[in-house]
Image: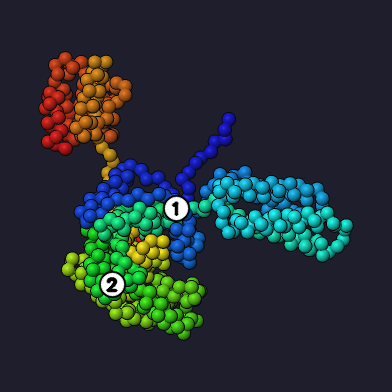
Amino acid sequence: MAEKKKFQAIKGTRDLLPPETDLWNRVEQTAREVFGTFGFGEIRPPIFEPTELFARAVGGETDIVSKEMYSFEDHDFGELEKLRSVLLIRELELENPQSASLHKGQLTEFNAALEAGMKGRKIPVTPENERALDDLKMHAARIEILRRDYTGGEWQARERFNASVTGIRQALRVVEFGDVISLRPEATASVCRAYIEHGMHALPQPVKLWYTGPMFRRERPQKGRYRQFYQIGAEVLEMVPSFAAKDAATAGGAKSAPKDAAVDAEVIEMVMAFFARLGLEGVKLEINSIGDRECRPKYVELLRAELLKVKDKLGPDSQRRIETNPLRVLDSKLESEQAIIAGLPKIADHLCANCAAQYAEVKRQLGMRGVAYAENWRLVRGLDYYMRTTFEITAQGLGSQNAVCGGGRYDGLVELLGGQPTKGIGFAIGEDRLILSLQEAGKGGTALGRDVFVAWMGEKAQATAIAAAQKLRAAGFRVELPPVEQKFGKALGQADKLGARYALILGDDEIATGQWTVKTLADGSQAKMSEAEFLELLRKSL
Ligand code: ATP
Ligand code: MG
């Protein structure tokens, strides 16, 4: 007998169950409707992509890429991979001919398979793999010669032997049998990749796309933070005509500021309209400009210089970030650092003319659209690709994980991924947190009820019950049809438990007369009526 084992959802993942899934569907349907009114079409990119895509787009230095991605090699060389593991752990000494000859056989086999795989282009022919194969062959040959000529006791020979053993281990570790792929930690990179791959720059610009689906990050699970979580997002992408500028980030100069700002404001307006339609409560929008390639680096240097002056008063995380990413210090929630941060130079005072003009215009545009906002000069986004307009939206009932949406402008990202100069702005909503907030505010779903419970008894009644259920379902009503006959008392009890509105009672009498018995469960009243009358009643009352 197989051992009894209790399976559970993996840490950080969870099942979404009815009736909660009704709310999820309502949220996604509302997104579809609201975004549709702004001219957005839905895109469904794959769940996994080459790791390289995320590394480039999100940034190799971010937490997401450096430690939170679920990555794996994608290949058909499982056996070869096992052989590599064996070779990696085998102890090898010059004096031990037995282990050496076993090693030699396995290494020869490995090298031959690797070479054949690369020749047949089944294993990627990368410079790393080519160098590894060369090294493996060279060290294998060296070990052979050393073994053959070894007469005992020469320390130089042993040293060279050990060096080659290390060389083999190093080369083995480098070999990649296939592409490394990752579960997506976010979707903007995928949308940009798709924009390039399908030549969407040839479509009328801008291209407006929205998406929804699961994302994966190996974070510490807590309320509002999961390892598989869901986002609803949208992106606006617009190729920059080749005459306008040599790159997207500086395209059009000051002239493009009003247009970009209007696009930013409309995207923000759209998210706020979506939240309003859902009845999300305690919604707060914060905005900032983090400058562009021209002014941000200068500000970052200034910030770094100021931070160095107060380094001793900062915590270890912030001290480290002075070197790696000074902007992130502004993000710090550490109580002891707040007073110091308040005195740091603000980016708004150091924006270049273009960025300043655009930021001012974004605020004016938001005003024209009746969108309330607060400025937060400390708002910096976690991902590398943002520039100029950035924003974050928080909602109530979420504790410290209260950000439900993050977004911003990312001109230049498409170019970074191999496309033409293209402007971009987008956002991602954390759907799990959005749902939590709606539930906390009492806007969750209720159990899936039934409109009609068909209580039937007798063979003839079953045929009528099936036909009735078919008709009612085709008309869109939720119908429960018991698979076997039940005493009416039991049937009515079950109808009650399921929260049915009406019980349709079909017995010999009803079949003979064509007059159905309909019981309204809320008040227990009962009436006789024809099929047509019952349908009419349902249409009117539901
Ligand atoms: P946070 O600061 O909360 O970690 P983030 O800056 O990592 O957020 P983004 O990458 O901008 O978030 O993603 C946008 C939104 O996705 C967030 O505002 C949040 O609502 C949601 N989100 C991000 N990570 C998770 C997660 N692990 N679980 C649930 N929702 C998440
Ligand atoms: Mg995060």
In the picture, measured across the screen, residue 337 lies left or right of residue 360, that is right
Quadrant housing residue 159: bottom right
Residue depicted at x 23% and y 63%? 266
Residue depicted at x 26% and y 59%? 205
Q: Can you give x and y, in whole percent of width and height, for residue 86 in the image?
A: 68, 49
Q: Can you give x and y, in whole percent of width and height, for residue 515 in the image?
A: 13, 20
Which residue matches tag 2?
252
Of pointers 2 and 1, the one earlier in the residue sequence? 1
Quarter holding the N terminus is: top right
Label 2 C-beta lies within 8 Å of the nearest ligand 1 atom: no
Q: Can you give x and y, in whole percent of width and height, for residue 503 in the image?
A: 21, 28
- Whether residue 519 is visible, yes or no, is yes
Residue depicted at x 61% and y 56%? 130
- Whether residue 23 is visible, yes or no, is no
In the picture, measured across the screen, residue 96 lies left or right of residue 425, that is right
Residue type highlighted by circle 2: Gly
Please tell me whether residue 485 is drawn above or below residue 302 in the rendered image.
above
Quadrant housing residue 279: bottom left
Q: Secondary structure at mark 1?
A: strand
Which residue matches tag 1?
49
Report the number of numbered marks.
2
Residue type highlighted by circle 1: Glu
Closer to the camera, 89 or 101?
101
Closer to the camera, 471 or 49?
49
